[in-house]
Image (cartoon, helix red, strand yellow):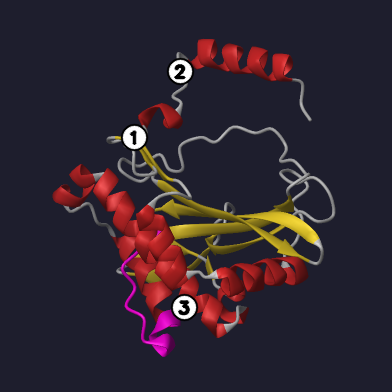
């Protein structure tokens, strides 16, 4: 475990350098398992009725276990982020290194990697779609000003088109605009290398993020699975 004193010292230095403040979401609990800071962030805890309903319908325990097994078998360790042989992940969507591959609406667009999406078991593909849809809805609620302004562009149209091309076969109507999905797992006694999360995009209204996570037991060990979705 990391020394708390050293961690707190680094945190103070970063705050001073960037004139930042730290907000504890638990101080903004509305009493129904939802921690809400309007226009900034919201956290649906395990006691939230809304999240419990979504999980029971979209991502029950068998899906949680199956996704963890898929990551365990097919994922890879990112040595810049993960620690230990049991820490693995896979990506869907635009990678950080974006090589132009096709033209959409008269503009060059980066490669959309759907390799793992295509190889996931069908029930997991559909379950993932439900989680992406729920996440998009909650992001729109949190950032209603963007929705009202009708912020769309050819890039977001392209992203939705690429998702829809895949989900047509499942008769799923895509209503999300996530350009990047990072799904990872690590043992609960493991750790994540220290890092800073910065704005996801330099363009205005293109820096939203949604996270879905859970704990699961597979192969005699407890793991934490985290699905991070980056909003176009």
Of callouts 2 and 1, the N-terminal one: 2
Assess whether mark 1 and mark 2 are in contact (beta carbons under 8 angstroms).
no
Residue 118's place in the image compared with 86, above or below, is below
Residue 210's place in the image compared with 166, above or below, is above
The alpha-carbon separation of the residues under discs 2 and 1 comes to 14 Å
According to the picture, the residue beneath numbered tag 2 turns out to be 20
Residue 164's place in the image compared with 203, above or below, is below
Residue 207 lies in the magenta stretch: no
According to the picture, the residue beneath numbered tag 3 turns out to be 126
Pinpoint residue 174: horizontal percent, then vertical percent. Answer: 34, 73
Quadrant (top left/top right/bottom left/bottom right) for the N terminus: top right
Pinpoint residue 192: horizontal percent, then vertical percent. Answer: 71, 41
The alpha-carbon separation of the residues under discs 2 and 3 comes to 39 Å
From which residue to which does the magenta span run? 166-178
Total labels: the figure holds 3
Determine the residue positioned at 40% across, 64% down. 54
In the image, which is nearer the foreground, mark 2 or mark 1?
1
Determine the residue positioned at 24% across, 56% down. 152
Q: Which mark identifies residue 40?
A: 1
Dot 1: element: loop
Image-quadrant location for residue 58: bottom left
Seen from the viewer's position, the closer of residues 158 and 192 is 192
Of callouts 2 and 3, the N-terminal one: 2
The alpha-carbon separation of the residues under discs 1 and 3 comes to 29 Å
Dot 3: element: helix
Pinpoint residue 23: horizontal percent, then vertical percent. Answer: 44, 24
Q: Residues within 10 Å of mark 1 (few under 14, many from 20)?
A: few
């Amino acid at each position: 475990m990391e020394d708390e004193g050293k961690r707190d010292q680094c945190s103070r230095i970063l705050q001073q350098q960037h004139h930042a403040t730290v907000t504890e979401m638990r101080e903004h609990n509305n009493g129904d398992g939802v921690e809400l800071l309007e226009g900034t962030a919201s956290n649906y805890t395990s006691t939230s009725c809304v999240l419990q309903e979504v999980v029971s319908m979209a991502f029950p325990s068998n899906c949680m276990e199956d996704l963890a097994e898929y990551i365990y078998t097919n994922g890879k360790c990112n040595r810049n982020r993960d620690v230990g042989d049991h820490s693995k992940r896979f990506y869907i969507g635009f990678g950080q290194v974006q090589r132009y591959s096709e033209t959409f609406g008269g503009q060059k667009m980066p490669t959309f990697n759907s390799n793992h999406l295509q190889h996931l078991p069908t029930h997991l593909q559909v379950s993932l779609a439900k989680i992406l849809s729920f996440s998009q809805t909650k992001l729109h609620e949190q950032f209603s000003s963007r929705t009202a302004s009708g912020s769309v562009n050819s890039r977001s149209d392209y992203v939705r088109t690429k998702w829809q091309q895949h989900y047509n076969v499942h008769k799923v109507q895509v209503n999300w605009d996530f350009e990047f999905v990072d799904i990872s797992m690590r043992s609960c006694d493991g750790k994540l290398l220290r890092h800073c999360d910065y704005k996801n995009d330099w363009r205005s209204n293109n820096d939203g993020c949604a996270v879905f996570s859970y704990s699961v037991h597979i192969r005699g060990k407890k793991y934490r699975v985290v699905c991070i979705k980056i909003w176009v």
